[in-house]
Image (cartoon, rainbow, N blue to C red):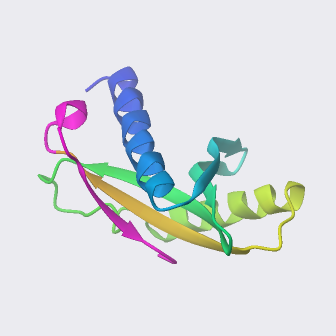
Amino acid sequence: MSGGERTLLGRWGEAQVAEYLRKKGWTVVASGYRTRFGEIDLIAENRKFLAFVEVKLRSGKGPVSGAEAVDARKQQRLRTTAECYLSTHPTEKQPRLDVAEVLAPDGVNTPAPKIRYLENAF
């Protein structure tokens, strides 16, 4: 799979999670938020929380789940990037770091991808 195809697939997975969150009453306030420390796929809020969401797309064939793929190094980059966001976007809401795993065996052709959403994943 080329880099462009991987990027397209990743954006599709993020769109699936964004829609999932909207259906649950969340508002997506940013996607693809980047700093020199890293990127946060989605930032969403509801009345109580501001969630920094790492989206992992899986075909179901690999040995590692999406949540397991967010190792300690990635977790630290996400924390630092979230702190950067909070320094320029203060909020009274409780921040948290979530992981959304999108199971799509046929990639963008998967008619109904399954989403496993882990609140406060780390």
Q: Which residues are magenta?
A: 105-122
What residue is drawn where x is 70% and y is 61%?
82
Where residue 29 sits in the image (x, y, percent)? 67, 48
Q: Nearer the viewer, residue 30 or 41?
A: 30
Q: Quadrant of residue 105?
A: top left
What residue is drawn where x is 17% and y is 38%?
111
The quadrant in which the N terminus is found is top left
| Side of 35 relative to 97 (left or right) | right
Where residue 56 sits in the image (x, y, percent)? 37, 53
What residue is drawn where x is 33% and y is 68%?
68
Q: Quadrant of residue 35?
A: top right
Q: Quadrant of residue 67?
A: bottom left
Is residue 42 part of the magenta span, yes or no?
no
| Side of 71 relative to 114 (left or right) | right
Q: Nearer the viewer, residue 4 or 51?
A: 51
| Side of 92 relative to 101 (left or right) | right
Where residue 86 sits in the image (x, y, percent)? 80, 62
What residue is drawn where x is 87% and y is 61%?
87
| Side of 42 relative to 8 (left or right) | right
Where residue 17 sits in the image (x, y, percent)? 42, 50
Q: Is residue 49 above or below residue 88?
A: below
